[in-house]
């Protein structure tokens, strides 16, 4: 009976740790991307859990940092900002690295912001980052995901 009790307590600890981890910012592997002369350090959110947490619970983010969401196949993608403290802009990106559309998102809201067409990628940056650099629909990003 002691072994079963120990396993149960261990399982509770692991489950509780997972819940606590969702209340803290995640830190993912990052890769460089470029938008013209601008270099971005993009954390890569690949798994469903990484994508669901995204940039939640972060109080700050360096100017040229962001998060690239990678999906299995091009589909209409929608994002919202529950538990996200930072105002963000999101660029929905086609398979060739071209920006499809960009949306500004307000913190702590459940308003959906969707791609204008099916995409496999979405890049979140601090709000206004794309506009300040003249990046708009049709701009091509470069980096590992797009093979350039």
Image: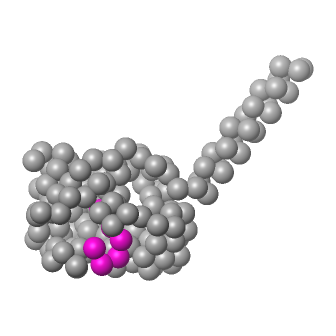
Q: Relative to 11, does residue 143 appear above or below in the rendering?
A: below
| Coloration mode | one colour
Numbered-mark total: 0
Residue 112 appears in the figure: no
- Residue 25 in view: yes
Q: Is residue 21 magenta?
A: no
Query: x and y percent of residue 12 in the render?
Result: 75, 39
Span highlighted in magenta in the image: 123-129
Which quarter shows the N terminus?
top right
The residue shown at (33%, 47%) is 30
Q: Is residue 49 above or below residue 78?
A: above
Q: Is residue 17 left or right of residue 64?
A: right
In the image, taking residue 53 as reference, residue 121 lies left or right, namely left
**Residue 46 percent across, percent down from the top left:** 36, 47
From this viewpoint, which residue is outermost toward the right?
1
Tell whether 34 sits left or right of 109. left
Q: Position of residue 33 (x, y in %)?
A: 21, 54
**Residue drawn at x 77%, y 26% as measured from the top left:** 7
**Taking 30 as reference, is 53 left or right?**
right
In the displayed structure, 130 sits above or below 97; it is below
Residue 121, picture quadrant: bottom left
In the rendered image, which quarter is residue 65 located in?
bottom left
Q: Is residue 126 magenta?
A: yes
Q: Residue at x 34, y 60 (%)?
A: 66
Tell me what residue is drawn at x 23 percent, y 74 percent.
Answer: 130
| Residue 146, percent from left and from top | 15, 49
């Amino acid at each position: 009976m002691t072994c079963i009790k120990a396993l149960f307590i261990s399982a509770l600890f692991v489950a509780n740790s997972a819940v606590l981890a969702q209340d803290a910012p995640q830190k993912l592997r990052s890769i460089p991307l470029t938008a013209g002369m601008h270099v971005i350090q993009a954390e890569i959110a690949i798994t469903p859990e990484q994508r669901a947490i995204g940039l939640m619970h972060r109080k700050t983010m360096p100017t040229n940092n962001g998060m690239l969401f990678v999906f299995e196949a091009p589909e209409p993608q929608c994002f919202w900002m529950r538990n996200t403290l930072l105002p963000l802009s999101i660029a929905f990106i086609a398979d060739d690295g071209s920006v499809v559309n960009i949306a500004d998102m307000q913190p702590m809201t459940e308003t959906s912001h969707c791609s204008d067409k099916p995409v496999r990628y979405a890049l979140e940056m601090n709000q206004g980052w794309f506009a300040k650099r003249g990046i708009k629909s049709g701009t091509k990003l470069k980096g590992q995901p797009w093979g350039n």
